[in-house]
Image (cartoon, rainbow, N blue to C red):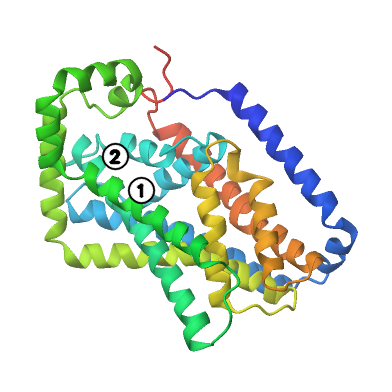
Amino acid sequence: MRLRPSKTLIFALTGLIIFLIYFMLVNPLNVLNHIRRLNLAIYALAVAIDYLGLLAFGVSWYILLRGVNVDVSLKDVIGATLFSLFMLAIFPIPMGSELIRMHYIKDKKNSSSGKAVATVLVHRIMYNLAFMLMIALAVFIVKVVYGYKFPVQSRILLLLMGFAGCCIAVFAFALNANTLKKIYNRYSDKIQAYINKYLMDYAKALNLNDINTVLEEIEATMRELQERKLHIAAAFAMTAFHWTTGAITAYLVARALNFYISFWLIVALYAVVEFIQEINIVIPGGVGIIESSLTMVFIAVGVPLPIAAAITILTRLATYWLEKLLCGLVSVYFGFRTLDLSGLGEEP
């Protein structure tokens, strides 16, 4: 996995330019007038809940690791998780956070490359399942319970659900060790040549030199997890809570500005922004893109532009900038000192 700071800087500057254009178009003086009326106590609660969501994300992975008897502390798992999110904010590469976490956990006591891959992919499947569940629940409550006309077109919601479903299918296929072993044994020469040519950095980082051994470890790990139903349920609950904290934060920010929006409506709208964030592999943190998208979906439900922009800017301050400040501080204490990332980012 090659990290290219020069390209990242160019993309970061691009995001900054997009944000500055966005900020100039939303009437900044009017937006700042709304921000000055912010209820700081409610906003502090919003930030605290967002931080709890971060911790819940790490805790959910820890529960899975303990379910397969990996000997690692909760503090270290949360530290590795926050470090991986910080690095992803700087280098938005596909599966970046997952690769860092796999690399970290594979050498722990009672762990292996197979356990690292399996627990991280199951964790990712849970995130996408929570995404689909919360969208479905939000649509049901808004349309059926409250009887409101939903502002987002059905085809967009189907796209979001389809994207999450495809991600789940891909990760589930990657965990189907029996099928993968058959494919590998039949096309081992071609697959190994492809790995050597395009994926050698990943293979070195995750000790994937013996594919069959790793697949056997994945198979054994999945059998263990299937017997740990309480661990699965607890991990999913924590993952679902993590997913909802972004919407809770946006809801509380609106309340802090003395503006009411239905929480379940925000959940559905926030899913659109989460989708955009998921597919963003260019602009670090989606700076500029996320702000524009979130403001537009608020306007779509009737929020006036200055208030929509104020909610967006304060929500992003909590869910991105203050998040990454915490992750950065943890990285200084934990990641850069204790994580051996020599296998990640090596040039051949």
Mark number, residue 131: none
- From this view, report whether residue 43 is shown above or below residue 344: below
Q: Residues within 10 Å of mark 2 (few under 14, many from 20)?
A: many
| Numbered circles on residues, count | 2
Residue 112 showing in the rendered view? no
Residue 141 showing in the rendered view? yes
Seen as rendered, the residue at the extreme top is 348
Q: Which residue is mark 2?
A: 105
Q: Secondary structure at mark 1?
A: helix
Q: Quadrant of residue 131?
A: bottom left
Residue at 73% in and 72% down: 303
Of the image marks 2 and 1, the number of the one nearer the N terminus: 1
Q: Amino acid at mark 2?
A: Ile
Query: Would residue 49 be found to the left or right of residue 65 on screen?
Result: right
Residue at 80% in and 51% down: 23
Residue at 45% in and 22% down: 2
Query: Would residue 301 be found to the left or right of residue 241 on screen?
Result: right
Are the residues at dot 2 and dot 1 in contact (C-beta closer than 8 Å)? yes
In-front residue for pair 286/343: 286
Q: Quadrant of residue 129?
A: bottom left
Seen as rendered, the residue at the extreme right is 29
Q: Using the numbered discs, state the Cα–Cα distance from disc 2 to disc 1 in whole angstroms.
A: 8 Å
Mark number, residue 77: 1
Give the position of the C terminus as an image quadrant.
Answer: top left
Q: Quadrant of residue 201?
A: top left
Residue at 38% in and 22% down: 342
In-front residue for pair 335/245: 245
Image coords of residue 322 (percent x, y): 62, 53
